[in-house]
Image: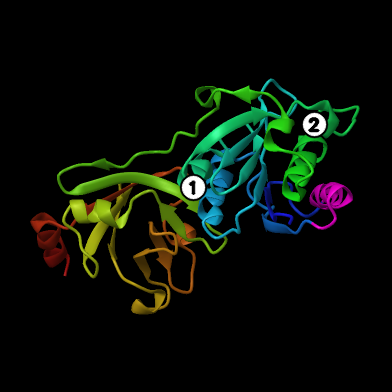
Amino acid sequence: MSLPISFLSDFGRTDEFVGVVHGVIARIAPEVHVIDIGHDFPRGNIKASALALLRAVQYMPQGVLLAVVDPGVGTERKPIAARTDWGVFIGPDNGLLAPAVAIVGGADKIVTLENPELVLPATGVTFDGRDRFAPAAAVIASGQAEFEDLGPEVAPGSVTPLMMPLVEHEEASAVGEVLWMDHFGNAQLNISPEDLQLIGVAPGQSLIMRIGAIEHELSWLTAYGDVQIGEGLLHVDSYGQMAVAVRGGRADQSYPLEEGIAVTLRRIGTADVEIRGAQE
């Protein structure tokens, strides 16, 4: 029985690249079903795509995960496959696969894709998604090859990790950053509900969001409908992280939010109450 292939890339839909990868898989293993996770992630943005994989893999059927966001294609970076209890991850060794592999329990074996019988002949070296990754995914998903047939094993410690930003806790503040901005302009933070509880903030309470030197008051609420149109809120998003949103609008237009920017969430103190009272 064949396994499904879940496919993510930054190829976009303007050119033929996504269709060509589908075509290579279909020629090798026409019975294999390919699920497109998405292909419009920021070009060459490994971190954003790795986070997308991390979010998506928890909902994908077990099988093969093919990910191609590869600004280092044609260089010495390795093409790899990682075997896990979930299935096989295939892509470039640039940190792209690392968070998703970790969340499913880690890899018990990693190989480089060096078997010449599983590489399409090409005069160029800039389309490994077509020439190297797609054939590997197809033969594994269809059972035409064993994992060990893909190439020689490499030490797990030699594979590139992806360093994720850590949250810093101060007496009344959690200091983090924007992990990603979604299509709707919502900002997912690396700050979790547990981080806020550590600084004494609970659901339903208001807090201060500081971006640079500017502070904004937000409430930790459940849904967009808990605020008025055009009003901002902080909520737990569908992946369990704190997110900034604006009902009927875009958080990235109402606040100076963008991927990677530092954000501090601070418990409201006595001084804030006094200032607010004086302004009223």
Relative to 122, is 63 on the left or the right?
Answer: left
Residue 23 visible in the shown view: yes
Residue 211, x across and y down, in percent: 34, 48
Colour style of the rendered protein structure: rainbow
Label placed on residue 264: none
Q: Is residue 48 above or below residue 157?
A: below
Asked whether 188 or 112 is in front, the reply is 112
In which quadrant of the rendered view does residue 276 lie? bottom left
Residue shown at 38% from the left, 74% from the top:
223
How many labels were placed on the picture?
2
Residue shown at 43% from the left, 48% from the top:
178
Relative to 188, is 227 on the left or the right?
Answer: left
Q: Is residue 59 above or below residue 15?
A: below
> Secondary structure under badge 2?
loop
Three-letter code for the amino acid on which mark 2 is drawn: Thr
Residue shown at 43% from the left, 73% from the top:
247
Asked whether 257 or 182 is in front, the reply is 182
Relative to 263, is 172 on the left or the right?
Answer: left
- Answer few, some or many: residues within 10 Å of disc 1's Cα (few below 14, many 20 plus, some between 14 and 19): some
Residue 94 visible in the shown view: no
- Which numbered mark, 1 or 2, is in the foreground of this view? 1
The N terminus is located in which quarter? bottom right
Residue 136, x across and y down, in percent: 75, 39
Three-letter code for the amino acid on which mark 1 is drawn: Val
Q: Which residue is disc 2 drawn over?
A: 126
Q: In the rendered structure, does residue 22 fall within the stretch colored magenta? A: yes
Label placed on residue 104: 1
The span shown in magenta is: 15-31
> Secondary structure under badge 1?
loop
Q: Is residue 83 above or below residue 172?
A: above
Relative to 192, is 32 on the left or the right?
Answer: right
